[in-house]
Image (cartoon, grey):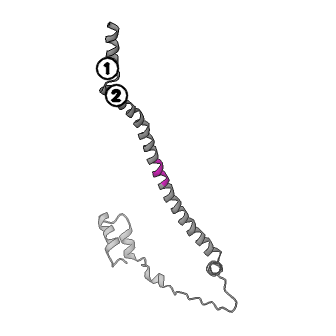
Amino acid sequence: MLFRKKESKIKLFFFNQTSYFLVGLVLLALISYPLSKKIFQNYQLNNEVKNLNEEIKKMESHNQELKNLIGYLDSKSFTEEEARLSLNLKKSGEEVVVIKNNNEEAKDLPAVTAQTKYALTPGKKEPLPRRWWNYFFNRSVF
């Protein structure tokens, strides 16, 4: 009789609704953890594929720009332009005109005068900040 009571308690424990719920909960946890891990890995892979596709598009556009540049550098017009600018060559039948500037740049540059030398020489009685002020902002010096 004692054996029957134990058997019935075991049957009640294993065939109870609460035990089914607990077993189902454990199985759900065992299945959902690897599943969530795989979903997260899939999400990371999709993001990486998306970033790599964007990088491929950028590289292709840069590659196309470089091909266009190579095409221009191989063209006859670029060769002629470089020959004219770098090597000072001309086409046959073409006349070259050279325009010289008669020291226009020299007119724009300030001349060194005695006042300029005075303003820049060290050891004068004016304080250094005053001399710098005169150097940069005093128009009579230049």
Is 88 drawn above or below residue 29 in the view shown? below
Quadrant (top left/top right/bottom left/bottom right) for the N terminus: top left
Quarter residue 124 falls in: bottom left
Q: What kind of element bears circle 1? A: helix
What span is in magenta? 44-49
In this view of the protein, which residue sits in the foreground, 102 or 9?
9
Crowd around label 1: few <14 · some 14–19 · many ≥20 (10 Å):
few
Q: What kind of element bears circle 2? A: helix
Name which residue type carries label 1: Leu
Residue 46 is a magenta residue? yes
Left or right: 51, with 76 as reference point: left
Q: Distance between the Cα atoms at labels 1 and 2?
A: 11 Å
Sequence-earlier tag: 1 or 2: 1
Residue drawn at x 44%, y 37% is: 34
In this view of the protein, which residue sits in the foreground, 119 or 9?
9
Pinpoint residue 103: horizontal percent, then vertical percent.
Answer: 50, 85
Name which residue type carries label 2: Tyr
